[in-house]
Image (tube, grey):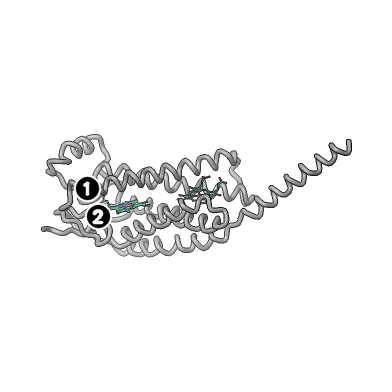
Amino acid sequence: MTKTYIWSLPTRLFHWLLAISFAAAYLLGDADDLQSLHFAFGAFAGTLIFFRILFGFFGPKYSRFSDFPIGVKNHVEFVKTFFAKTKEYAGHNPAASVVMLFILLAGILCSISGYLIYSSESKTFSLGFDPDFLEETHEVLANIFLILVGMHLLGILSDLLFHPDTGTLRSMFTGYKNVQAENVRLNNFQKIFGFLWLIIPVVMFFYANGFQINEQKGNKQETEETEQRESESEEDED
Ligand code: HEM
Ligand code: HEM
């Protein structure tokens, strides 16, 4: 059986780090006492995705968006040949390509909206969006992201059931698929890029871990409560 190297090390590390950081950010979304950790994992995931988007333009074959078969014809062919197994895909198949693109889009927008909530609540800066709108958008994007991950896992499961010989699942660990295609090779620029792709998200993790808005929130709430008490006592005096 022919083995071809499809996913280089930066792609595989990106993938598993994204899976972990997304899961952590999502689960910590509501945890008030671990809010800084939520910001840290969210910023980590967002930065990973930002670099993956750049990799989509000047990364190697199979990672480049121009290599994603997303045209209507590709989808028709994919459906027609799915059970006949007459067509194999070295990179992402058409359905996977669409899900991947939406994962990247939902993920980056989710991180940006999270940062905008933080910056307006901590009074760092504000783009003038309504805070309720930002919070709603952030929550919706996080849930869209989760649904896309569910679709992604169903895709992997169906591949495992109907195309077990391709070794798609294993390819995200080893890099190799059982397909006849060109091996992926990183040039020096892509290797340096891959290194920064791992370092910069870690820097962002620690940077965002220092974000604090609980105090401001607490103070705001206290001020509102004091104002309310004062106005109530004024009314009583009258
Ligand atoms: C939060 C969880 C996850 C997220 C956000 C996620 C996201 C992604 C993304 C963005 C890609 C495209 C990689 C690229 O083109 O650079 C991908 C590919 C892939 N993922 Fe995941 N993933 C998650 C969990 C998983 C899990 C749990 C598995 C294994 C059971 C898995 C198996 C794979 C495989 C095998 C591919 C390559 C698919 C192909 O060759 O077309 N992923 N994933
Ligand atoms: C992929 C990355 C992220 C995911 C999946 C995510 C997910 C979530 C989830 C599920 C919630 C709870 C929503 C609710 O039920 O109210 C939440 C809340 C929140 N997130 Fe994120 N988040 C991400 C990134 C970020 C980042 C980078 C920041 C800021 C630096 C951030 C700031 C916030 C804030 C301030 C809240 C509380 C909003 C509120 O008061 O309702 N998030 N996030």
Question: Pointer 2: what residue?
Answer: 169
Residue 174's disc is none
Question: What percent of the width, then of the height, locates residue 75?
Answer: 23, 37
- Residue displayed at 24% across by 60% down: 175
Question: What percent of the width, then of the height, locates residue 170?
Answer: 23, 58
169 on left or right of 149: left
Label 2 CB less than 8 angstroms from ligand 1: yes
Most foreground residue, 98 or 64: 98
Mark 1 burial class by Cα count in 10 Å: few <14, some 14-19, many 20+: some
Question: Pointer 1: what residue?
Answer: 159
**Distance between the Cα atoms at labels 2 and 1?**
8 Å
What element does badge 1 sit on?
helix
- Residue displayed at 85% across by 38% down: 236
**Circles 2, 1 touching at the beta carbon (< 8 Å):** yes
- Residue displayed at 17% across by 41% down: 82
Label 1 CB less than 8 angstroms from ligand 1: yes
The quarter of the displayed image where residue 215 is located: bottom right
Report the residue that reaches farthest toward the right.
Answer: 238
Most foreground residue, 28 or 79: 28
